[in-house]
Image (cartoon, rainbow, N blue to C red):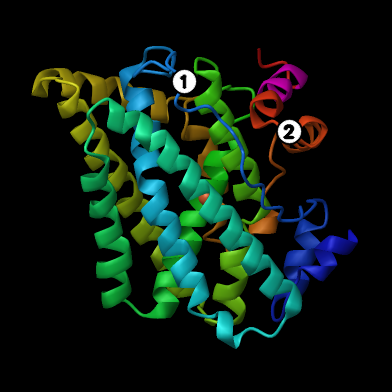
Amino acid sequence: MPENLSQNTHQHGREQTQASAAHVAQHPIIPRERLQFKLDADDIPTYWMGGDAFQSRFWDALSIIFPPGEKYFMNCVRDYRDQITDPKLLQDIKDFNRQEAQHSMVHRQDNDRLRKQGVDVDRWGAYVDNMLNKEYRGKYSKAYNLAVTSALEHFTSIIAHSLFDKRDVMKAAHPHVRAMYAWHAIEEVEHKGVAYDVMEDYAKVGYLMRVWALVHATFMFPATIFTIQRALFIHDGFSAWQRAKLMAKGMVWLFKPGGLLQPMLKAYWTYYKPGYHPWQETEQPGYEHWLAAFNASGDPLKASEQTRSAMALV
Ligand SMILES: [Fe+2]
Ligand SMILES: [Fe+2]
């Protein structure tokens, strides 16, 4: 077993995890700060995903969700920090927080791009902030909120897996926005076990609450994306009929064989298995390429494009 994997296993129930995850390397969590994505470049079109309104606005809705969403993740993990004595997990939480804080900062820069288009970013950011950080945190227990966090982290890590695989979902994207998502994906994969470890070992969330939170997140997350995406379409001037057509076409893109979501389904279902742990998931395609390219230049734009070349995605 790799040394870093054995270091990262915590208390109960991990023998099974270690046995089944032994082939998956766990990556160190490395916060990368002050990165430049040039998201204010004038040549980024509104429909930066090859002119596709549905796809561009789908990712834009996600970008609006991230700052309040990641604040919620950090809040829910912090609820347990005082109970944790394991120095490795404490360091992981620190690095998790630093990574999520950077993601929020860069997505705010991306959201400034939307603001320049006249999008009411603050309204929709506040909508998500209110739902998660006020309503959920006021209404549900700390343990359940952490279970929702862990479920949402499962979504971000399985979406991350799609970025560099052979479907090449970012093929038509503007390189600057694509580089932001590539970096975010790499770091989501690095810290994908942190909220889960705190949930299992300190919040003592059992199987039923864990899977119920995933069912909850399975409805809440897409509903939130589509609510904001609809608002973006209305802002763009699409009529109800045009929006219906865009959504119908978009659903095909999401669910068709080789679409964004369909290949994620297998990874999605693994979360329902008793004894599941995020490190049982398969390796992030392109991780080593991205890391080598980024470490060589410190430039996330170069890292993204060089990973694409190395993976024959260009
Ligand atoms: Fe993130
Ligand atoms: Fe995350």
Q: CA distance from mark 1 to mark 2?
A: 23 Å
Amino acid type of the residue tagged 2 in the rendering: Trp
Image quadrant containing the N terminus: bottom right
Prevailing secondary structure class for the magenta stretch in the rendered image:
helix
Q: Is residue 94 left or right of residue 86?
A: left
- Does the Cβ of the disc 2 residue fall within 8 Å of ligand 1? no
The image shows residue 132 at horizontal and vertical percentages of 32, 62
Image quadrant containing the C terminus: top right
The image shows residue 26 at horizontal and vertical percentages of 77, 55
Q: Check disc 1: other Cα within 10 Å, few if <14, some if 14-19, many if 20+.
A: few
For marks 1 and 2 on the same chain, the one whose residue lies earlier in the sequence: 1
Amino acid type of the residue tagged 1 in the rendering: Ala
Q: Residue 45 is drawn in which quadrant? A: top left
Secondary structure at numbered mark 1:
loop
Question: Mark 1 highlights which residue?
Answer: 41
Determine if the magenta segment contains residue 132: no
Q: Residue 98 is drawn in which quadrant? A: bottom right
Question: Mark 2 highlights which residue?
Answer: 290
Vertical position of residue 218 compared to residue 296: above or below:
below
The image shows residue 261 at horizontal and vertical percentages of 46, 35
The image shows residue 271 at horizontal and vertical percentages of 54, 58
Q: Residue at x 30, y 58 (%)?
A: 129
Q: Check disc 2: other Cα within 10 Å, few if <14, some if 14-19, many if 20+.
A: many
Q: Is residue 200 visible?
A: yes
Q: Which residues are magenta?
A: 305-310
